[in-house]
Amino acid sequence: MGASGASRTRVAACAGVVLAAAAGLVVGVAAPAQGQVLGADDPQAIKGSFVVTLRDDASPRSAVAATAGRLTREHGGSVRAAYGHAVNGYAARMSDAQAR
């Protein structure tokens, strides 16, 4: 392969890297995660009152109060109680939209 063939190969390789990086940027933009609300249609559910459970790998039980505060600041609502023993989570008052 001559000098011009090597140049074309380098240009093609660089273009492939740029396209792959651009595709990664487009794919990397994700919609905000939504929570799963269980029992919302139950007639005994208390409107505006939720128990939020957290995965142990997402929030250690020792940090549940801080995590609850951060999440309610980000999504709205108010923390009523934080739990770190039987359940990793917290009780909160919030709208249905804020709960999702």
Image (spheres, rainbow, N blue to C red):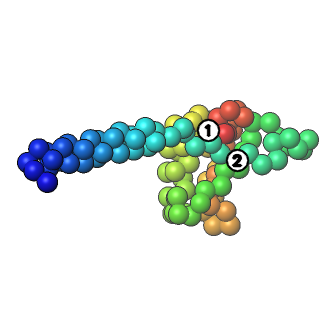
Instruction: Point out the tag, 1 or 2, that comes first from the N-terminus.
Output: 2
Q: 71 or 20, which lies in front?
A: 20
Question: What's the mark number on residue 55?
Answer: none
Q: Residues within 10 Å of mark 1 (few under 14, many from 20)?
A: some
Q: Residue furthest left?
A: 3
Tell me the quarter of the image containing the N terminus: bottom left
Q: Secondary structure at mark 2?
A: loop
Q: Secondary structure at mark 1?
A: strand
Residue 59 lies, in percent from the top left, at: 52, 58
Give the residue at mark 2. Answer: 36
Could you tell me the amino acid type at mark 1? Ser
Could you tell me the amino acid type at mark 2? Gln
Residue 62 lies, in percent from the top left, at: 51, 63
**Disc 1 to disc 2, C-alpha distance:** 19 Å
Question: Residue 80, located in which quarter of the rendered image?
Answer: top right
Query: Residue at image x 59%, y 60%?
Result: 55
Q: Along the horizontal axis of the image, is 5 left or right of 26?
A: left
Q: Residue 61, relative to residue 21: is it above or below? A: below
Q: Residues within 10 Å of mark 2 (few under 14, many from 20)?
A: few
Q: 12 or 27, which lies in front?
A: 12
Give the residue at mark 1. Answer: 78
Query: Residue at image x 46%, y 42%?
Result: 27
Q: Is residue 87 visible?
A: yes
Residue 75 lies, in percent from the top left, at: 57, 36
Residue 50 lies, in percent from the top left, at: 72, 45
